[in-house]
């Protein structure tokens, strides 16, 4: 029995899969088995993986009978796992040579931790590195805060305890595109999580990635999970629209939501901040991270309001004046970036339209690719966790 099973779904990954497998086969920790699950690829992915499997017995090539999608593919890998630990990676990413060694050592030293991830190094096909993205603070209090409205755990860099994840039903049954955020939200109620503050994975960003191709659909599902997490924390129902405004602000998108929804989002952030900072004795650096998140969220939210309403809030709202420093307050007065883009002849950032909110009540026609019961399924998955 290996110590680690690595689940690696692969679909039309002929350009990347060789480099991904090479990075795993050259790990300093060698006691592992890789489940490469070919999800009915239409290119040479299967042939490339078969050549690797023929040359190294640690690779086990599995073929799905038809394209099943990432969630069902991950669950199949979880069913096959025999090792006490499971590591995840995508077919277009590269693991640093010491990734498994560092994560296995951490899990052995911290038996109360069920999930460990790491920082990542996001890189484009042209080799551009996004140094500002992928380095989530590893402080445990900060993770509790971040889970309220976003997913702070890098899925391709994660390692978790096999039986723990099986105990909460794995990744769920629907292709929501936020299968990881759903899973972490379930596990967050049962176990500790940690992020190793080292870049142990090169994360490949390209135009054909799932996130880039499905921004609106993925964000709608993520908003439902965030709403569930916020309601659990506050102990009361919260407005879906307000939660969506916050989620899109985290993506730096201004939205087409109504002014009442935008004001409700500000009030919701204030309620979260008040409860979180009152109930915990936060380290100064953790509080600085929380304030940094609020800077990033409040600026696009405020800029979605008419100028007179924006100025009124900046002058009179104690919460906003508390968490925004002078530079952030000035940046929130006027949309300088929009003006700069206009002067340079560049297009404005995407404005996310309001989704079909009849979907929330199970009525009407959902956006393409989103099922009518997707919100209820997320709630059913999460509410069953004690």
Image: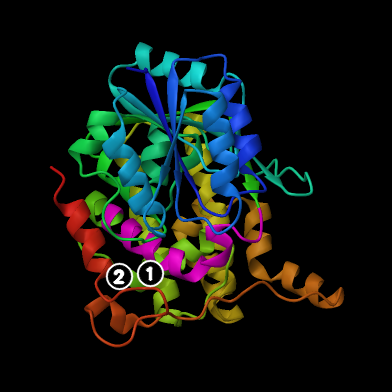
Q: Would you say 65 lies left or right of 125 here?
A: left
Q: Secondary structure at mark 1?
A: helix
User: Among all residues in the image, which is located at the extreme bottom?
Assistant: 364
For residue 366, above or below residue 326 = below
Of residues 214 and 268, the one nearer the viewer is 214
Point 57% across, 25% down: residue: 55
Point 36% across, 45% down: residue: 74
Instruction: Give the labeled residue for mark 1.
Output: 242
State the separation of the CA atoms marked 1 and 2.
5 Å
User: Among all residues in the image, which is located at the extreme right?
Assistant: 344
Q: In this view of the protein, can residue 169 be seen by the observer?
A: yes
Q: Which residues are magenta?
A: 206-229
Mark sitting on residue 381: none
Q: Badges 1 and 2: C-beta atoms under 8 Å apart?
A: yes
Q: Is residue 277 magenta?
A: no
Point 45% across, 56% down: residue: 319
Residue 119 at x, y = what percent? 56, 33
Mark sitting on residue 239: 2
Residue 116 at x, y = what percent? 41, 28
């Amino acid at each position: 029995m290996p110590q680690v099973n690595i689940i690696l779904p692969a679909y039309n990954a002929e350009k990347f899969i060789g480099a991904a497998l090479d990075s795993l086969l050259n790990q300093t920790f060698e006691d592992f088995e890789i489940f490469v699950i070919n999800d009915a690829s239409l290119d040479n992915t299967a042939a490339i993986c078969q050549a690797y499997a023929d040359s190294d017995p640690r690779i086990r090539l599995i073929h799905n009978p038809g394209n099943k999608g990432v969630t069902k593919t991950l669950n199949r890998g979880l069913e096959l796992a025999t090792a006490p630990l499971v590591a995840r990676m995508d077919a277009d990413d590269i693991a640093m040579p010491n990734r498994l060694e560092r994560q296995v050592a951490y899990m052995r030293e911290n038996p109360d931790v069920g999930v460990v991830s790491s920082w990542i190094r996001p890189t484009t096909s042209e080799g551009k590195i996004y140094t500002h993205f992928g380095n989530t603070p590893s402080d445990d209090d900060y993770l509790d805060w971040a889970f309220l409205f976003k997913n702070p755990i890098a899925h391709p860099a994660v390692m978790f305890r096999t039986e723990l994840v099986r105990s909460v039903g794995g990744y769920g049954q629907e292709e929501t595109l936020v299968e990881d955020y759903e899973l972490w939200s379930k596990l967050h109620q049962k176990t500790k999580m940690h992020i190793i503050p080292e870049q142990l994975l090169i994360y490949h960003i390209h135009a054909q990635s799932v996130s880039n191709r499905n921004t609106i659909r993925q964000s709608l599902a993520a908003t439902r999970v965030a709403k569930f997490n916020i309601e659990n924390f506050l102990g009361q129902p919260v407005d879906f629209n307000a939660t969506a405004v916050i989620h899109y602000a985290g993506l730096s998108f201004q939205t087409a939501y109504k002014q009442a929804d935008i004001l409700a989002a500000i009030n919701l952030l204030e309620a979260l901040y008040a409860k979180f900072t009152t109930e915990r004795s936060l380290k100064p650096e953790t509080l600085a991270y929380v304030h940094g998140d609020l800077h990033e969220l409040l600026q696009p939210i405020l800029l979605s309001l008419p100028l007179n309403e924006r100025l009124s809030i900046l002058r009179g709202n104690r919460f906003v004046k508390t968490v925004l420093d002078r530079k952030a307050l000035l940046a929130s007065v006027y949309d300088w970036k929009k003006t700069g883009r206009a002067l340079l002849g560049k297009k404005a950032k995407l404005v996310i339209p309001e989704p079909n909110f009849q979907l929330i009540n199970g009525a009407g026609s959902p956006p393409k690719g989103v099922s009518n019961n997707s919100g209820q399924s997320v709630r059913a998955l999460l509410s069953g966790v004690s």
